Image (cartoon, grey):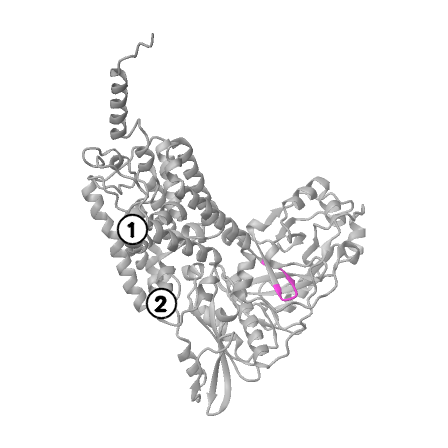
Amino acid sequence: MAGLWLFSASSFALFVSPPKDPLPIIEQTFPEATTISDKEGELSLRTIYKGEEIIGYAFETNDIARIPAYSGEPVNMLVVIDPAGNYLTANVLEHHEPIILAGIPASKLDIFADQYKGLSVSDRLKVGGNKTQGTVAIDGLSGATVTVMVMNVAITKAATKAAIELGIIEPKSNVIQPLSTIKKEIFTKENWQTLVGDGSIRKLFLNRNTVDEAFIGTAAEHVDEATTTQKQDMFAEVFYTLADIPTIGRNLLGDAEYDYQVQKLKAGEHIVALLGNGYSFKGSGYVRGGIFDRIQVHQNEEAISFRDLDHQRLTDNYIDGAPSFKEMSLFRVQEHFEFDPGAPWQLELLVRRQTGPIDSLFTSFKGQYDPLEQYVDTPPAIIPEPELTLTQQVWKEKTPEVVVLLLLIGVLLLILFFQDILVQHPTFMHRLRHGFLIMTVVFIGWSWGGQLSIVNVFTFLQALMSNFSWDLFLLDPIIFVLWCAAAVTIILWGRAVYCGWLCPFGALQELVNVFGRWLKLPQLELPFAVHERLWAIKYLILLGLFGLSLESLATAEQFAEIEPFKTTFLLKFSREWPFIAWASLLIVINLVNRKTFCRYLCPLGAALSVGNGVRLFDWLKRRKECGQPCKTCAKECEIQAIYPNGEINMRECHYCLDCQVTYFDDEKCPPLKKMAYKKRKNEQQIPAVNVG
């Protein structure tokens, strides 16, 4: 309960925003409206009428373009347009941005969204700078650059799809140009002047006058303004290229470094090289936030941002005639961006000016890159098959992870079916279990974010009570498969299988405890009478959260932060200190007490145990001597799930099978030792038979 208090005390500063009802916003936008329809069609559009006349349309970005923001969750926005395709309003309905809430009022997101009023779906909108080259600039939000860029993409993508669906604008050609491939066998030894001259390496050059002009008419117009004599001075010089093209990369990086970098690439990944002087294209924001917020690569409608894990500093270049550079970096373009090395792309450099202690404005400058035909193979354009639904696309993208997860679940089922054989080999069984738990933590938890939460349970229950749709749950294949596995194993064996084998946080706790025992740290175990009463805490937490969820799922989600799952696996400890401290405490305590959170605090475990009574199988073997007089298993059970009378409490058992190892071990199990002793004694009393 102390954990609940800790999080509730700072909920307004650290938690997600409560979701807003879109209908009052629509009614405020159209005071003359007589009818507002329910969500209709594949895009879930609402139509607003004045009598028989249609006066507007409304939609939510999460229904059309779910784009993860900084937290990994999308910012859901209500967008309203008129029949001509003009934006009437854009409002934030819900967001999960803890970094914003830690220091920036949520109201600033609404101020950002207000800028769309009066703009058109047909406008090309960009965040930062002035209107140039047919684009409309929108002021960014200092300290939340990535978030507002994602918001802009979500609004414009959703609005474009809605406008096409409504016939307001014409759809783009359905002709698809397949991705080009780099000709790996083509290499020519060249110098710097040649590659720059033929366009293999391009340059974005800005003098101070160009930058000053870009801020004219803004609050930052005279900030850091150049004097008359400084106008032609260099502000930034950035050379950029695609470094996994052999003729470019081998000349620039050298053979050894080129081979090393290319071998690390997955299929569909590429390397962008940046070399610059003057204004830093890296800046320092990535050190704090992990994202390079001064550069982006644009290709078609895709805006590619880079994280710290995509970056590698280049210490030297090997090409003849190259000038010296203050900064040299390689950036990995991940495969999910579907970058086409044979199609034109642009490098965007963001320049920021501080207008106050916190506030700032930025504008951007783009440099064009047109790939040379001799470097790539470009296949002919094709007419695509009907587009996959969003759910189908997600499952297709996640197929490798789903296959591996299903294989892991298959291995677990084999372990359960052959448990009586495996437990007779204690060393192998323990190694097998520890190896499986490591896979659970590393792959299911940290790599795939597959940690079930009590919030999932409440979401499912609310969906059952409202308009249930499988699409809501199918959008996360890993979570869906895990819930299916949990449901099946609960029916067959109870909640123990998920909690003991497939829960990443439970697995992490157990591995930490194994490490503590390896260090020979003293283990702290409560008297069974106290331990048994502490079981009730997690059920009380479950009831409290369930009651909150009936009133508001967002409120329940706030208090559900007693689960350290999001901090540990989704955000990987990139959060405010109370969350990190709470998760760390729950992990470290396992050095001296196994699975403390699971035993006493976990509301998810409590919820799963509710269905324990329907389990079909009871494969954990017991003898009549268990508990009376033998208490070996009860003392050895490291989560104290065995009563002193020998009965296993399946609501608390985690199916580690340690008691079954003891059950078959004639050197540890007293009844087996007694039977073995009697057998040896009887054999010794049998008189020898004289054959002769």
Residue 412 located left or right of residue 539? right
Question: Could you tell me the amino acid type at mark 1?
Answer: Leu
Q: How many labels does the image show?
A: 2
- Residue 102: x and y in percent read 41, 59
Using a 10 Å C-alpha cutoff, classify the residue at mark 2 as few (fewer than 14 neighbours), some (14 to 19) or many (20 or more): some
* Distance in Å between CA atoms under marks 1 and 2: 23 Å
Residue lying at the far top of the rendered structure? 692
The residue indicated by pointer 2 is: 462
Q: Is residue 63 above or below residue 503?
A: below
Q: Does the magenta stretch include residue 624?
A: no
Query: Which quarter of the figure has residue 459?
Result: bottom left
Which region is colored magenta?
Answer: 294-302
The reply, left or right, for residue 571 in relation to residue 274 is left
- Of residues 88 and 630, the one nearer the viewer is 630
Q: Is residue 159 above or below residue 536?
A: below
Instruction: Identify which residue is drawn at 50% across, 63% down.
Output: 147
Q: Name the residue under label 1.
A: 601
